[in-house]
């Protein structure tokens, strides 16, 4: 793919912007130019939060999203806020537990247990890494090894093992779903 | 491969300042500009510089002016409410010709407004925020790379001309992360402040020179000087003599006219054969750039004039690129500010139409395309 747009959306504090930063770094490592923007509310947790990646070869004229290729929704707070930028070719990934009213329409929607899987790993805060890994495993926007390397090197040592377990769990979710 | 990194607009302003030789930052963090302060607090100690978090924006602007009077390259950063507070001491810097750089990351206003949402509502405040006729330069980057290069240019202009320079960016550009290669953006040779040298007898800190820029007396170099916010003579002491007062004030504004070529900077996108010219800055210019491509694909000859130097407004450059345009469209995230200047310059010759948005969202390429189609139909 030459140009594509990805949105991570949910509730403030879920680590959406961090996931976007990891993927952004992986895409740059593979030679892409990335424009990353974010939108959040003036609260420390909660409210709608999102981060968009506009990915291209060379600098994008307009750095904000216009039509999403991939959309991740981790919380109901953001469930319907991207309707205007979803098209028939958009792949939408939603959290099976926290997104109660997913967008409806003529596009592919996958509901996966990101939060439930994170809870089983012992910390529901790694749902962002599970979802990131699942998104890349499913879409192939970059090599899993490139992303794994970024997640590994940018995670503080204290959480390295947990994040790598989350990374593997995300990949496994996609494999199970494909079967 | 080039050294490609992901960098945020605000961080790029800070790194640009360091690259320009800034060694002093005083500020009071405020959304959406806080990352400038954060980055400066990390970077300045590495170059032996000073970072101070002051008690408020008034004090931080005072500290910046003081540091510059001491001979340092000094900067602060803020957003709407803080920018309002900085205006008094900024006026002092304009009047006393003290170099300084102010980054203003525009958010929704007035007052506390929408702290995390973008706006372009400080276009007129940047020009006229402090009272009285005063010289000021305002630069408007539209990308992360430009946040870096325009902050460097801001330091070069303020140091060279002894005029405060404001770098005016909107929240989208300030918080945008883009892939950049800083190695390719390094300045060749920095333009520096001219410090007073030579005879100390009869030294005049505001002497009228050919270039209208008085050499700056660096404290400790032994030049007697007096600095005041009062209208002053070449000696630095106050005057209310009508002829002398007017001459002193006119010199500081004439100085910008004399060095207009150094200050002006624009980007032109397909303006030569444009039937419709868009004038925009910041994120609105990025939307306009995409809109020009989309319109051209539909056979509509659109073009973009983007002032990188907003004030002094590039009057002659705009007039020179209008050519055969039938109308001018001005998309801006306010209720119509830059359009006033364009109407003043062009409205007798052709229609000037605004596209305005103050809902906290950026103007999109599709909205510009729709407006252009409406204007041309």
Image: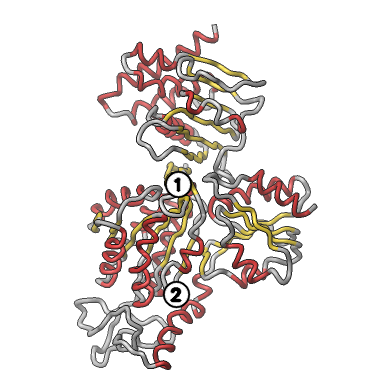
Picture coordinates of residue B16, whole percent (x, y): 39, 56
Helix, strand or loop at label 1? It is strand
Query: Could you tell me which residue is drawn at 61 percent across and 62 percent down?
Result: B339
Residue B8, image x, y percentages:
42, 45
Residue A30 in view in this figure: yes
Residue tagged by mark 2?
B135
Find out whether the residues at labels 2 and 1 contact each other: C-beta distance under 8 Å: no
Determine crowd level at label 1: few under 14, some 14-19, many 20+ residues with C-alpha closer than 10 A: some
The answer to whether residue B147 is seen in the rendering is no
Q: Quadrant of residue B343?
A: bottom right
Q: Nearer the viewer, residue A83 or B303?
A: A83
Relative depth, front residue between A148 and B173? B173
Name the residue beneath numbered marker 1. Answer: B114
Neighbours of disc 2 within 10 Å: few (<14), some (14-19), many (20+): many
Q: Are marks 2 and 1 on the same chain?
A: yes
Q: At 45% across and 33% down in the image, what residue appears?
A: A49
> In this picture, is B339 found above or below B216?
above
Q: Which mark is residue A118?
A: none
Across and down, in percent, residue B273 comes to: 75, 60
How many angstroms separate mark 2 from mark 1 (CA)? Answer: 30 Å
Task: Please state which of residues B177 and B330 is positioned toward the viewer in this rendering.
Answer: B330
Query: Is B28 displayed left or right of B264 in the figure?
Result: left
Q: Tell which of B353 and B153 is nearer to you.
A: B353
Identity of the residue drawn at 50% across and 59% down = B140
Q: Return the chain for callout 2.
A: B
Quadrant hosting residue B189 = bottom left
């Amino acid at each position: 793919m030459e140009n594509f747009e990805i949105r991570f959306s949910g509730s403030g504090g879920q680590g959406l912007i961090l996931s976007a930063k990891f993927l952004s770094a992986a895409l740059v490592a593979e030679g892409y130019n990335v424009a990353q923007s974010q939108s959040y509310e003036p609260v420390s947790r909660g409210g709608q939060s999102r981060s968009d990646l506009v990915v291209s070869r060379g600098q994008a004229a307009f750095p904000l999203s216009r039509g999403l290729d991939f959309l991740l929704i981790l919380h109901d707070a953001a469930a319907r806020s991207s309707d205007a930028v979803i098209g028939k070719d958009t792949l939408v990934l939603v959290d099976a537990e926290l997104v109660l009213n997913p967008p409806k329409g003529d596009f592919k929607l996958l509901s996966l247990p990101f939060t439930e899987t994170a809870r089983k790993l012992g910390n529901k805060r790694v749902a962002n890494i599970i979802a990131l890994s699942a998104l890349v495993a499913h879409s192939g926007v970059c090599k899993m090894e490139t992303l794994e390397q970024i997640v590994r090197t940018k995670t503080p040592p204290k959480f390295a093992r947990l994040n790598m377990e989350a990374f593997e769990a995300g990949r496994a979710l996609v494999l199970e779903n494909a079967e | 491969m080039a050294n490609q990194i992901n960098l945020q607009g605000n961080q790029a302003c800070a790194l640009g300042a360091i690259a320009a030789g800034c060694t002093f930052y005083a500020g009071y963090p405020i959304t959406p500009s806080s990352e400038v302060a954060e980055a400066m607090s990390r970077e300045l100690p590495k170059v032996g510089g000073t970072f101070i978090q002051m008690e408020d924006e008034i004090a931080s602007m005072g500290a910046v002016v003081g540091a510059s009077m001491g001979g340092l390259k000094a900067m602060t950063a803020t957003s709407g409410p803080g920018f309002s507070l900085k205006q008094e001491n900024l006026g002092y810097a304009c009047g006393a010709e003290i170099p300084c750089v102010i980054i203003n990351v525009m958010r929704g206003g007035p007052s506390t407004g929408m702290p995390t949402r973008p706006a372009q509502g400080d276009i007129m405040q940047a020009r006229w925020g402090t009272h009285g006729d005063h010289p000021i330069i305002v630069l408007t980057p539209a990308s992360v790379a430009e946040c870096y290069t325009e902050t460097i240019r801001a330091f070069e202009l303020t140091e060279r001309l002894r005029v405060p320079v404001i770098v005016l960016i909107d929240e989208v550009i300030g918080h945008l992360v883009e892939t950049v290669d800083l190695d390719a953006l390094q300045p060749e040779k920095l333009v520096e402040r001219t410090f007073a040298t030579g005879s100390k007898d009869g030294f005049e800190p505001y002497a009228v020179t050919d270039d209208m820029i008085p050499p700056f007396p660096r404290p400790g170099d032994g030049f007697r000087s007096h600095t005041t916010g009062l209208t002053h003579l070449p000696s630095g002491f106050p005057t209310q003599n009508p002829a002398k007062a007017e001459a002193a004030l006119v010199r500081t504004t004439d100085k910008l006219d004399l060095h207009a070529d150094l200050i002006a900077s624009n980007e032109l996108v397909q303006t030569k054969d444009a039937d419709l010219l868009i004038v925009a800055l910041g994120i609105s210019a990025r939307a306009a750039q995409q809109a020009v491509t989309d319109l051209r694909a539909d056979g509509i000859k659109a073009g973009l004039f983007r002032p990188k130097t907003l004030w002094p407004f590039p009057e002659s450059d705009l007039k020179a690129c209008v050519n055969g345009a039938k109308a001018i469209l001005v998309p801006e995230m306010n209720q119509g500010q830059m359009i006033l200047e364009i109407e003043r310059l062009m409205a007798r010759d052709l229609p000037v139409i605004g596209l305005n948005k103050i809902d906290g969202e950026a103007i999109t390429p599709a909205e510009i395309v729709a407006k252009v189609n409406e204007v041309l139909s």
